[in-house]
Image: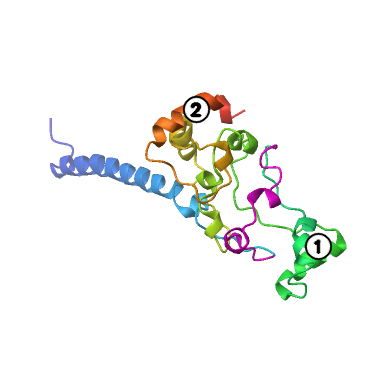
Amino acid sequence: MPQVFHRSFNTLSRVSVFGSLLFLGLAAWAASVYVRSSYATNRDIARDQPIPFSHEHHVTGLGIDCRYCHDSAEKSRYAGMPATKTCMNCHQQIWTGSPVLAPLRASYQNDVPIPWVRVHRLADFAYFDHSAHVNKGVGCVTCHGPVDRMPLTWQHGTLLMSWCLDCHRQPQMFLRPREQVFNMEWQPPPDQEQQGRQLVEEYGVRQLIHCSTCHR
């Protein structure tokens, strides 16, 4: 039987097969890099806000506790945003004529909330309870990063499932005493794992890694 295809087609077929596998591998690698990048996760991106609020100034400079503004952090699923009245408790006395705070004064006078741009946004299919984490000894810094040193607020973590599971799989490495949850200067001790295990037992923390924990 005469040869239908030229011998060079053998080489071309091998190149096509292995080239396709290489392309698929590179495409999968590129996709994995993209989904973890700031373009996809919004990590480390400071959002423009109606008022350029500085945590660095208010927390580090003035020593204001997180709970003064986020008063539902310990008792609600959401940490909450401060009402305009909370800001005006101080700014009726200081910086009263600042152009930067004109939106704040307008909000207070017109009884209209400030349209803050959300920085941390979990996917709609992910359930998260802020108070549950705070009351189990998860510090603000663990999820929000060094927010006390942020002149403008940005997202510290990726908020990807793998990022959450790092803590859920070994909570002893991330827990701190409850009285230190809002202490931005607290540092884990050299024996963090040992002390963390004690806190896991004391606070009744479980390794909640089943899908239904977050996807309800």
Seen in the picture, residue 45 relative to 71 is either above or below; the reply is below
Q: Which residue is mark 2?
A: 200
User: Is residue 187 shown above or below 92?
Assistant: above
Check if mark 2's residue and mark 1's residue have beta carbons within 8 Å: no
Between the residue at mark 2 and the residue at mark 1, the CA separation in whole angstroms equals 44 Å
Q: Position of residue 125 (x, y in %)?
A: 61, 35
Indicate left or right for 105 with 75 as reference.
right
Q: Amino acid at mark 1?
A: Ser
Amino acid residing under circle 2: Val
**Magenta stretch, residue numbers:** 51-76
- Which residue is rendered at x = 23% and y = 41% of the image? 18
Viewer can see residue 83: yes
- Asked if residue 206 shows in the view, the reply is no
**Residue 145: where, in percent of width, then height?**
51, 50
User: In the current view of this chain or complex, which residue is farthest to the right?
Assistant: 110
The residue under the point 64% across, 36% down is 131
Which quadrant would residue 29 be assigned to in this image? Answer: top left
Disc assigned to residue 107 = 1
Q: Is residue 52 above or below residue 166?
A: below
Tell us which disc is closer to us: 2 or 1: 2
Residue 84 x, y percent position in the rendering? 78, 58
From the viewer's perspective, tell me whether residue 172 is left or right of residue 116. left
Estimate how packed mark 1 is, as few (under 14), some (14 to 19) or many (20 or more) residues with alpha carbons within 10 Å.
Answer: some
**Label 2: few (<14), some or many (≥20) within 10 Å?**
many
Q: Residue at coordinates 50% horizontally, 24% vertically from top-left?
A: 201
Q: Which mark is residue 93?
A: none
Q: Nearer the viewer, residue 18 or 44?
A: 44
From the viewer's perspective, tell me whether residue 183 is left or right of residue 192: right
Label 1: state its secondary structure: helix
